Structures are given as structure tokens and as C-alpha cells.
Image (cartoon, rainbow, N blue to C red):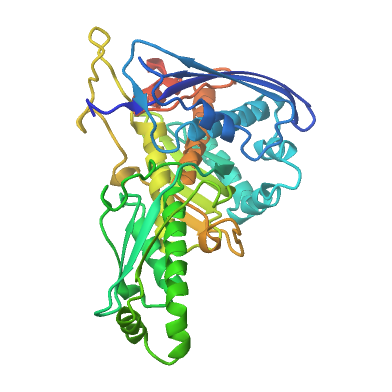
Amino acid sequence: MKAIGKRIGGQCEYEVDVRPMDGRIVRLSNTYYEDEGVSQYEAMTMLFREAFRNCYSDDSWRLRMRGALTDSPSTTWLRSPGTAESIATIETIMEHVAFVTGLDPLTVRLANMEPGSSMATLLPAFYEQVDFKERKAAVDRFNETNRWKKRGIAIVPMGHPIRYFGGMNAWVSIYHVDGSVAVTIGTAEIGQGVNTKVAQVVAHTLGIPLALVTVKPHTTVGSPNAFIEGGSISTDVVAYSARRACETLLERIRPVREDNRTAPWEAIVQMCYQRRIDLTASYNTKQTDLRGYTVWALCAVELEVDVLTGQVQLQRVDILEDTGESMNPLLDIGQIEGAFVMAVGFHLLEELRYDRSTGALSNYRTWNYKPPSARDIPVDMRVRLLQKSSNPAGVLRSKTTGEPAFNLGVTVQFALRYALASARRDAGLPIEWLEIATSCTPEKVLALTGTTIDQFVLH
């Protein structure tokens, strides 16, 4: 933690004019500032701009991007860089508009939705599926009868843009001895399941059992010119490369297979070897090979705040994500769960503290830096994949799942604001918009409750 660059800090200032009857934005001016540290090594402004519209119509919006060089350490890209900040910003604006106008946040979001957007249909349906109206009423009843425990609930839609850049290769080799297949790809397996999906694509394309396919460890010998692993595109890119390499091999094998239609795979491979047919092929995906698309997702969060300690417990989380025709539903659900819990750490737990006299990071171990642990995950977490969805632009009509769910973590922040509003109302504070940022640790939550020592009275 001492050596590696940290996530880029950001701040937004916005002005909004809306139609009071439905919250439709008629003018939006947003200025985004990011702290790039001592060097403009990896700015997020381009990524922020790409995702800012989310699933809304942005015809009357103006976005300014400002990067600041400061005396803080250099920063770096971290999961969903820029995109998470961008979607969090526009969703915060929607929540703020709803607060000022007194409208339901759902009404405001639907009023600003892009005409014909898939989200215009998905959001109302999701609202009903998670029983949001009934649960919100139950939350309000709970808050009315409890002074030192408060609950909050919120819902957020997301349209995550996937754009392709750079290229990655795949090298597929078939062994004549047993018909097994070895694959090397231009990206590393770091827990995202890329090796599993590539093996599935190879087995499906060649028409062989998955057990015959092995994905070898990534090396710079097999993939010397691979691009960076990021943007949730790596699995798509190498899976596409592997499929194209397999199609090349199938074309070479086709004459032998046509002459021996009943022969098993192992025999076909052996005959190809005897005819000196090259049983290795590679492909390097180009930027123009794949078309971008949008990952649609929704999240509903219900949480409980201990007003005496500032501790937050996620009672229930519902996530619906569009994965197209998922190649591996269990793997995709795991990715969605992991990305969301990582975002919980970003919004609630993980705070960087620097020594003001030296600039050194002062909390760099788990004694004083708290990533999410077993008791921080939701008590009830329900992840569903959108059914009857297909993605013509994706590999085998699928969609990626790596980063999109991370952006849904801001739902936690909105549910927290709802709970704190009730606590502050009971503390005698006026009803006002509450500014909440990331790294909202228990200490910060406790300070936001508005509780004073004279309120600790036993009756």
C-alpha cells in the first residue's frame, strides 16, 4: 500500500434547472475536478465523460473536465476508474433534484430517461420485483418507532458503456497424441475467470469436451505485445481471439473431417498430424473487430445504521444485471457480488489518511485500513441475471461483468442518506440536503447523525 498509487480523488460542482412537476432537467452544468497528484500519468477525464450520461438524455447538459496537479503522490486507475465517479455523480444529481422538488426519485429518473432506452422498461419492473414500495413503507414505520437504529432504502439504475481499445492475442495448439488443446492468451487470470471462459469458448467452437482444453499461464513469451487488462474488456477480447484462432484450425481440419465423418476427435487430429497439417493457430483481436455495447443493471439496497456507533449493516441487496447470454452464470454472479462488495469498501470503509507533515500514508495495514470483511457483506444478497437478453456484439452473444456492478455501490450511499435523514430529524435538526462522500467510515456516519450528549437520557 505504501508503494502503489491510489485511486484518483475527484470532486464535482453542479448547477441544475428542472421542471418542478416531474423533475425533468432542462439545464445541467457540471464541472469535474480530479486530483492527479504530481503527474498526469493516468487521467480519468475521458472515462468520466463517456459514462456521465448513464441511461439519461443529456441534450441540455454541459460537462467541464478539470485535472489538477497537486503535491500529493501520483495516482493510478483502479476498478471502474472515472466511470464509478461519473455514474455516482449523475445519480447524486438525480437524488438531489428529487429532494429539492419533493418528488419520488423514481419519478425524476424516469422523467430524464433516454427515449426508447431499455432502462425505461427495466426500472419500473425492477421496482415492482423487489417490492420497493412496500419495503420503503416498512422502513418508514421502523424509523418512526426506533430512535437509535435507523434504516434506509434506495434504488439506482445503471447503463455502463463498454468500449474496446488495444488488442490481445490467443494462441491455440492441438496435440496429436491425445487431441488435447493448449491455449495461451494475452491477459492474466487474476480472479475474473478469464481462463474458464476462454476454455469454454475453445471447447464450444471446436466441438470437443471442456476437459480436453487447458489454458496455460500468461507469459510475455506467448503474448509479448498484449494491451493493458482493464475496462472490463479483457475476457471479451481474448475470447474473441481464441474463437478466431479455433475457426482457422477448423478450416484446416475440415477436409479431413469431411472424409472421416464418423471418426472421433482424437482420430481426426492424428490424421491431420500425419498429413502434416499445422495444428497451431493464433489471432490478435483488433479494435475494429468488436463493437461496443451497454451493460444495463439495477440495484436496490436496504441498510440499518446504529446511531450510537455509526456502524452500518446492509440488510438486503438486490441486483439485476444484463449479461446477455451468459457463458457461465455462476462465474458472472460471483463477479457481480465481488464487484459490489468492493464498492461497499470504497463507499463505507476504506479511507486513506496521510501525514500532513511528510505526505506519507499513515494507514497501510488492516489494523487501521479496513477493507470489507465477512461481517460487512449484505445479510441477504440477491443477484439475478436478466433473462431473454442477447448481445449480438458480444462473444457468443454474452456481455462482460467485471466492472459494471462496482458502479452500483453508490446505492449504499443513497440508502445511508435516507437513514441519516431520519436520525437527524429525531435529533431536532432541520430537513436539508446532506452531503455524503466516499469513505464514509463509522466515525463520519456518527458525526452526521446530529446526536448530542444531552440526548442520551434514560426515561
| Residue in front for this viewpoint, 243 or 156 | 243
Residue 282 appears at what percent x and percent y?
39, 60
Residue 430 shows in the view: yes
Q: Is residue 125 left or right of residue 402?
A: right
Q: Is residue 155 above or below residue 311?
A: below
Which residue is pictured at 51% across the width and 51% down the height?
Answer: 319
Q: Is residue 206 above or below residue 18?
A: below
Q: Residue furthest bottom?
A: 262
| Residue in front for this viewpoint, 160 or 92 | 160
The picture quadrant where one finds residue 26 is: top right
Q: Is residue 61 left or right of residue 266?
A: right
Q: Is residue 79 above or below residue 16?
A: below
How many numbered dots are placed on residues in this image? 0
Q: Is residue 131 above or below residue 354?
A: below
| Residue in front for this viewpoint, 357 or 80 | 80
Q: Is residue 408 left or right of residue 184?
A: right
Q: Residue furthest front?
A: 276
Which residue is pictured at 33% across the width and 30% down the height?
Answer: 350
Residue 370 appears at what percent x and percent y?
28, 33
Residue 418 shows in the view: no
The picture quadrant where one finds residue 105 is: top right
Residue 436 appears at what percent x and percent y?
48, 24
Q: Residue furthest top?
A: 357
| Residue in front for this viewpoint, 37 or 443 | 37
Figure quadrant of the C terminus = top left
